[in-house]
Image (spheres, helix red, strand yellow):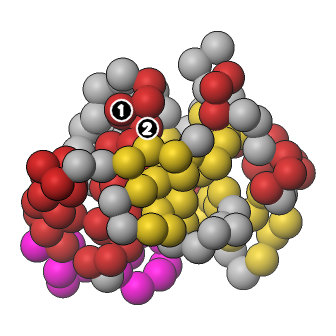
Amino acid sequence: MIIKFDKLQMEMISEVAEDRRKRYENVASNYGTTRAYAKDFAGAAGEYAVHLYTGLPWVARDTDYEHDVGNLEVRTRQTHNGRLCLHDLELARKNYPLGQKFILTRYIKRGEVELAGWSWKGMILRKGQYVDGRTYLPNRLLHDIETVLL
């Protein structure tokens, strides 16, 4: 499913991304990767797309104490075939239950986000491929986004 943003929504996402950039400009990424405005923008767009689709509240800021959207965690990739990924550093910091749901979104075209699917922590860790501190779930194992709220 593709979610398209209008100009006003894109401006709001940009403001959220800029706030995140300012907040973390002197802090390394929580996931052991390089921080970049483009990643913050894509992440905010992915979260906002899930908010629009589900109607659940969006926190709109990075926090270790609240979920991204409602009770869901959102992971955004910037490639067409990007996979859902959990980082060891994140799992060490947060105490997600095995049933915690993670949604994969892909920001692959300006103003559009693909809601690729979802899975839960236990499945990702059990069926995923572990590479250099990250566990990647094969895309074929994602559940249809239409079932995320069931």
Q: Quadrant of the N terminus?
A: top right
Say above or below: 51 vs 83: above
> Residue drawn at (12%, 49%), measured in percent from left and top?
8
Mark yes or no: residue 50 visible. Answer: yes
Contact? badges 1 and 2 (CB < 8 Å):
yes
Q: Indicate the amino acid at tag 1.
A: Leu
> Residue drawn at (49%, 42%), measured in percent from left and top?
73
> Residue drawn at (38%, 48%), measured in percent from left and top?
4
Mark yes or no: residue 97 visible. Answer: no
72 left or right, relative to 68:
right
- Per the rendered image, the range of residues in magenta is 22-35
Say above or below: 16 vs 80: above
List the residue tagged with mark 1.
52
Mark 1: few/some/many CA within 10 Å (<14, 14-19, 20+): some
Q: Nearer the viewer, residue 106 or 5?
A: 5
List the residue tagged with mark 2.
50
Q: Main secondary structure of the magenta part?
A: loop
Where does residue 35 sit, x and y in percent of width and height?
A: 34, 80
